[in-house]
Image (cartoon, rainbow, N blue to C red):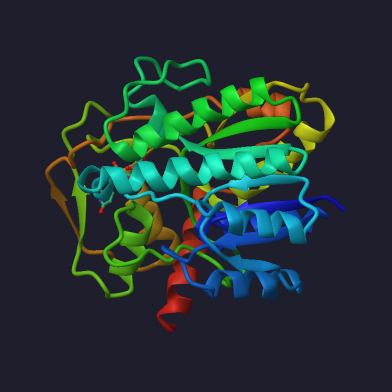
Amino acid sequence: MKNILITGGAGFIGSHTAVELIGAGYGVIVVDNLSNADTTCLEGVEKITGQKIPFYKADCCEKEDMRKIFGENRIDGAIHFAAFKAVGESVDRPLMYYRNNLLSFITLLEVMIENGGGGVVFSSSATVYGQPDKLPATEDTPRKPATSPYGNTKQICEDILLDAVKAHPSLKGMILRYFNPIGAHPSALIGELPRGVPNNLVPFITQTAAGLREELRIFGNDYPTPDGTALRDYIDIVDLATAHVSAFERMTGHNPDGSCEVFNIGTGRPLSVMELVERFMAINRVPLKYKIAGRREGDVEAVWADTSLANRVLGWKACRSVEETLANAWAWEKKLRRLK
Ligand code: UFG
């Protein structure tokens, strides 16, 4: 059995990925400093899979801690999710973002090399494309200068991996650029747990529907899009998690040494903010108070993925409907808030 270290494995994407890897026969080890997560989702992963997950509460920037984890486990590969991810906070605290997001990744790579290398997946983001000149965005769409330190850390980490893989033949790399991950596991045992007021659309919607927030503000209805609201590519979290299983199959199978492939992970279908809100209300039969507000600074008007490369090369495809995804997101929120 191959063992995969998941950094940031207690978080939203990490916990869903752990479930899918275990389901596909991988062993999983989680390291997380719990700076933006607690153990709720790890417990959920254990309930869903019926397996005890080896968990280290540690900071990936701490080399000795990482060495200990590698010393105590046979680790064949890693997925690096551990990072700060709030765009606005990164503008206020850039050094904290650069230190954490860059150092944690560099440390992971160094310790992997010390321990014989392996395959490493870096969790990147559609944010690297900014507002593309042509849509949908392909992997060859030029990256735009980042508009936040957060976005810049994603670009720099991509470059770090590309260079590290070239110089260290024991490493194999893969960069996955996620579009907008939403939803929750159908068991409602794991899902998104934002701290404080959510920045992202779907947790804000579910918290508003649950009565925790007064109303949803729709940021901008004067974009040059069919209904004036911004377009995104919302991908189901379980679909996104399964892409990591395909990534490891690819890296162990065909990926030649020294290469670092890049894949878009999305649905390939744009959806407007307004359409998403309407579909949430329709599928869940719950009212949602909302109003139109001004545009949010830093938002792009439209971005969605060309996923044909991932479909063809990874043999992976997003298959869940947005309705199913929004029903799962609502089921998770209701369970958290003990609503009927
Ligand atoms: N939106 C609202 N109201 C809200 C929250 C969001 O109308 O309360 C809108 C946004 O303006 C945007 C869309 O919903 O048009 C999606 O917003 P999210 O915040 O959910 O997602 P983003 O597309 O802004 O975020 C993505 C990634 C982030 C990344 C960011 C960088 O999910 O990880 O791009 O731009 F940081």
Find the residue positioned furthest to the right.
1
Residue at left 58%, top 24%?
A: 162
Instruction: State the residue in front, 28 or 191.
Output: 28
Above or below: residue 306 compared with residue 186? above
Above or below: residue 228 compared with residue 181? above
> In the rendered view, does 269 fall on the left or right side of 71?
left
Q: Position of residue 96 (x, y in %)?
A: 32, 49
Which quarter holds ligand 1?
top left
> From this viewpoint, is residue 318 visible?
no
Instruction: State the residue in front, 27 or 334.
Output: 27
Indicate the quadrant where residue 224 lies: top left
Q: Position of residue 303 (x, y in %)?
A: 38, 30
Residue at left 51%, top 20%?
A: 138
Indicate the quadrant where residue 51 lies: bottom right
Instruction: State the residue in front, 101 or 241.
Output: 101
Q: Position of residue 226 (x, y in %)?
A: 28, 30
